[in-house]
Amino acid sequence: MRTVIHCNFDLCTGCSICQMACAQIKTGGTNPRLALLRLEKQGLICRPVLCAQCRNAFCMQVCPSEAICREDDGRVVIREEKCTGCGLCVEACQVDMVFFDSDNKSARKCDLCGGDPACVKYCPTGALEKIKLGGDADA
Amino acid sequence: MPSGYMNKFLFVNLTTGEVKPMEVPEWLRDNFIGGKGFGMKLLYDLVPQYCDPLGPENVLMFMTGPLTGTLAPSMRACVVTKSPLTGTLLDSYFGGSFGHEIKYAGYDGIIITGRASEPVYLWIYNDSVEIRPAKGCWGMGTLEANRAIKEELRDPSIKIAGIGPAGENLVRFALISCEYNRQAGRGGAGAVMGAKNLKAVALKGTRPVYVHDQDAFLKAVEQGYRDLKASPDIQALVDTGTASAVPFANEVGVLPRRNYFDGTFAGANSISDFGQSKHLWLRSDACLGCPVRCSKVGYIRTGRYKGTVSDIVEYESAAMLGSNLEIDDIKAVTYLTHLCDELGLDSMSAGGVLGFAMEAADKGILPQKEVAGQPVRFGNPLAAEKMLEAVAYRRGDLGNLLADGVQRAAAKLGPAAEEFAVHIKGLETPAWGPRGATGIALALMTADRGGCHQRGMPLGEDLGGALWNGRPVDRLALSGKAEIVIHYQNYLAALDTLVKCDFGAFGIQPQTYLELYRTCTGRDLDGEDGLQLLGARIWNLGRQFNLREGLDPGLDTLPKRFFAPLPSGPCKGHRFTAEDVQVMLREYYLLRGWNADGRPGQEVLQELGLDNVKTTNI
């Protein structure tokens, strides 16, 4: 079993509250540009793009300092104390969901706020849903 | 510096090319908080007396509040300037994301003065500010220019506020289109921008807005969400935006039809949420940071306007471009609204102006019987379309006549036209015909920017059965309305410093706003009494500005149309008399602490600390 955020793009209003909440929790201030997720406008819809907590995580594979690891609940997290700020994980992620924090010279990515993601909590429409996937896939 | 603020204004002089950041004075924040408060004080201090609103010395300001750009639900920003339509103060509010981006770029406001020698746009990326040539996008529609500038700067994430052809051609009711397709609509701010040769302001900001006490602030935000959830008014906005106000206004008899001749319209349902949801809407859309999502996106699927991407036709546009023109085809009304947005015309004033022209044609007063081959008459959407284009480009005698608004057009057409020139102090009135609702009438007569629906109209008390001090309110009573109107004018002016959205304020409670402000800034507004005091200070300062610019208090009155009996609806036969107006105004002036001639008395100015307040200089 692993926990991920599922996007119901058809319910997304583009309000960016998910990004504002993410930035608030992760940086202590608000600005959607500082969030660890993004919204993409596609025609008449708005599609949230989030870290998939990949089972085959490129970011984890390329990290030379074993700073990226998987928690028991499937979350892929960065251990800040081990991160050297080399940026290889940022390059490796094919959906651009690992970010470089130039102030702290380290990589940042969604860790599902430890299991209670702020983006899901504040989303007013249910466009973002925390779900559990899998079960017997690894059996 | 308290949290919630960025502590800087960006000042731009387009004549000299000077660009400089300015620290926000502590006393300005103490007394005027932000948004409308900053705007009114700076307008008073920076705009030279009697300046031509379309001259270089007029000041165009984009102002935010301490809660703009934070997680506080449903916050906006405003444009403040001297209006080319009324010659008095103008504060016009817009949602979307442009206001928030001002904060993210590191500013509490942008103050623009002067006039560029050729078309330009401003490109602001945090501290970097460039005045760039706008030759490539001059002449483009608002949304077209939005795309073009993003392409030129190679960044689709930029937030833009800009004008369309109407602003460029100095149409006196031109709007500023703010990222994305949210309008600072009323009063002609777009013409002020056009007169400065300023096509657009493009913004990108990467700074966070910090709050004073994050845990307490997030609790206040969550309370705001609960307030919104608990409100049936908000639920209606979530479901249908303001479009459902069309059948309501029709039922209570205040929906303008035929240039406000009447207050009911047989086609009301077609242009309301019923017609719109059936033919247009696909999904809800929201401004940045707003859980309400009152906007409804879709497109016109068949017919003449097929392919037009549509936003909700909110109540004012549906009524002013629909019922007021006797157009009941929702696709046509949607297209006309879209055309106003793209050309950069305020759809409310545009509906007022077109209604006036159609009535003038009907009465044989208008020299032009046709526009681009279309007969100018009520119920003809093609004529409306051609007239909007003529106005935006000031094409021909008709376009030029109407581009200056109802007041000036009526003055040109002569006394017979004054009888049905529906405006207050030059601003075309909103889609709430005041006959049968005296509180609405008083709010319209006394609104600080002219005929405006956002300045304390007691819709709930007059028409919705809401109680005032525990008692029902008689919709036709002449006394007792001043107290209600003043309360809301002050309350809303105070919230416009934060800067609230009108719709959010239907649900979010005063205590929640106070708590949001307190936890965001670490400062206190002193409860609901404090809000009243702040609102009164701003309201009186605005009045002082208007009087200084030559406002005749005798214009605190209603258009002649409303002195004729209402032909239909539940208040059929109701009309105002000159005596009615005086009775209501006397009570209003008295409660405001103003002299009988409508000028604030020395005592009230002292009480509000306006007698010896400091002055801002640049």
Image: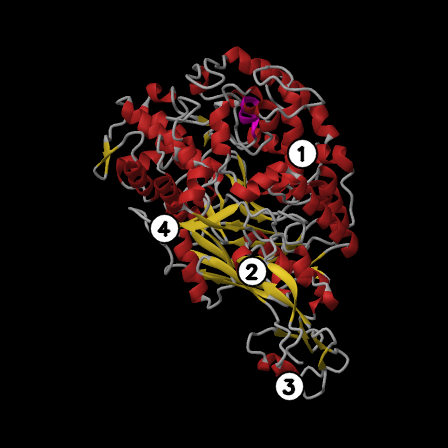
Residue that mark 1 sits on: B491
Mark 3 or 2, closer to the camera: 2
Q: Marks 1 and 3, how far apart in space?
A: 57 Å
**Residue B227 - label:** none
Pointer 3 and pointer 2: residues touching (CB < 8 Å)? no
Pointer 1 and pointer 3: residues touching (CB < 8 Å)? no
Q: Chain of mark 1?
A: B
Q: Marks 4 and 1, how far apart in space?
A: 39 Å
Mark 4 or 1, closer to the camera: 4
Q: Chain of mark 2?
A: A
- Is residue B392 magenta-colored? no
Q: Marks 2 and 4, how far apart in space?
A: 26 Å
- At numbered mark 4, what does the secondary structure look like: helix, strand or loop? loop
Q: Marks 3 and 4, how far apart in space?
A: 47 Å
Residue that mark 2 sits on: A8
Residue B126, visible in the rendered structure: no
- Residue sitting at x 73%, y 46%: B223
Disc 4 and disc 1 on one polypeptide chain: yes
Three-letter amino acid code at the position of disc 1 = Tyr
Q: Residues within 10 Å of mark 4 (few under 14, many from 20)?
A: some
Three-letter amino acid code at the position of disc 4 = Thr
Residue that mark 4 sits on: B308
Three-letter amino acid code at the position of disc 3 = Gln
Compare marks 4 and 1 and give the one earlier in the sequence. 4
